[in-house]
Image: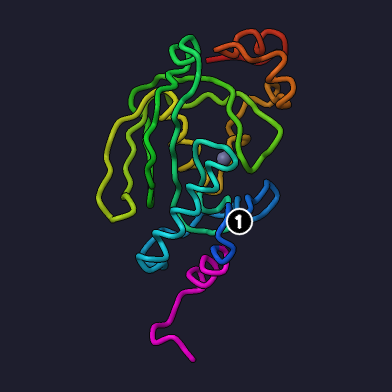
Amino acid sequence: MASPHARTPLAEQVDELLADGGPLPIVAAGDPVLRRPAEPFDGQLEPALLTRFVQALRLTMHAAPGVGLAAPQVGVGLRIAVVEDPAPVPEEVREARGRVPLPFRVLVNPSYEAVGTGRAAFYEGCLSVPGWQAVVARHAEVRLRALDERGRAVDEVLSGWPARIVQHETDHLEGTLYLDRAEPRSLSSNDAMANRWNQPTPGRAARALGFELP
Ligand code: ZN
């Protein structure tokens, strides 16, 4: 029997994706969905489906584990991302990277702009580029504007690691991967990261691998 309300193709796609109930498969680099600007969210998912989708994104982010996940990373071309970072790192890392806890939040139609001219360069990785990390120089401070999952406006200034996470996830919604902004010579396997470049800052890696830091 037909549904009384026409559903959008995106709603059908998300409904199917959620059918299994577990963490969602993460799409890897090479899939065009990661390279297309995502559609602004404008009610394509009804409220109950949006709630279930956000829960699935959060579950998937935790399972990965990661500190952010954008809808295109599960194959859904909508401008929605989740972020959450408990920041379980040593004090010296926290100080060097500004890696302070970022509570769970949903970003709908987010955008950011630089605040000031400061840059911060650190290694980062992406769940859609498994096995590798690279140094990305990003705005040290940004103004984030978005809606939350209930449509309430978000407008705040972030710095440190939360600013990095928000830039990385918002970039996904534009079809941009962190590698597009990375210092190519910094590219390191997870193994190299664990054994060589686990210092709080990438200074030693920059000297050994031959790349510039801002
Ligand atoms: Zn990513």
Q: Residue at x 43, y 12 (%)?
A: 95
Quarter of the rendered structure image containing ligand 1: top right
Q: Is residue 126 left or right of residue 190?
A: left
Total label count? 1
Q: Is residue 153 left or right of residue 135?
A: left
Q: Residue at x 34, y 53 (%)?
A: 149
Q: Residue at x 40, y 27 (%)?
A: 101
Residue 51 on image: x %, y %? 39, 59
Pointer 1: what residue?
Answer: 33
Tell me: residue 167, above or below residue 199: below
What residue range appears in magenta?
1-17
**Based on the displayed image, in which of its 4 quarters is residue 205 positioned?**
top right
Residue 70 on image: x %, y %? 51, 48
Residue 155 on image: x %, y %? 27, 40
Q: Is residue 97 left or right of residue 25?
A: left
Which element carries disc 1, helix, strand or loop?
helix
Given the current orientation, which residue lies at the most extreme bottom position?
A: 1
**Based on the displayed image, in which of its 4 quarters is residue 196 positioned?**
top right
Of residues 59 and 69, the one nearer the viewer is 59
Q: Is residue 94 left or right of residue 184?
A: left
Residue 94 on image: x %, y %? 45, 16
Q: Reply yes or no: does residue 11 show up in magenta.
A: yes
Mark 1 close to ligand 1, CB under 8 Å: no
Q: Residue at x 39, y 87 (%)?
A: 4
Of residues 106 and 211, the one nearer the viewer is 106
Q: Residues within 10 Å of mark 1 (few under 14, many from 20)?
A: many
In the rendered structure, which amino acid carries the disc numbered 1? Val
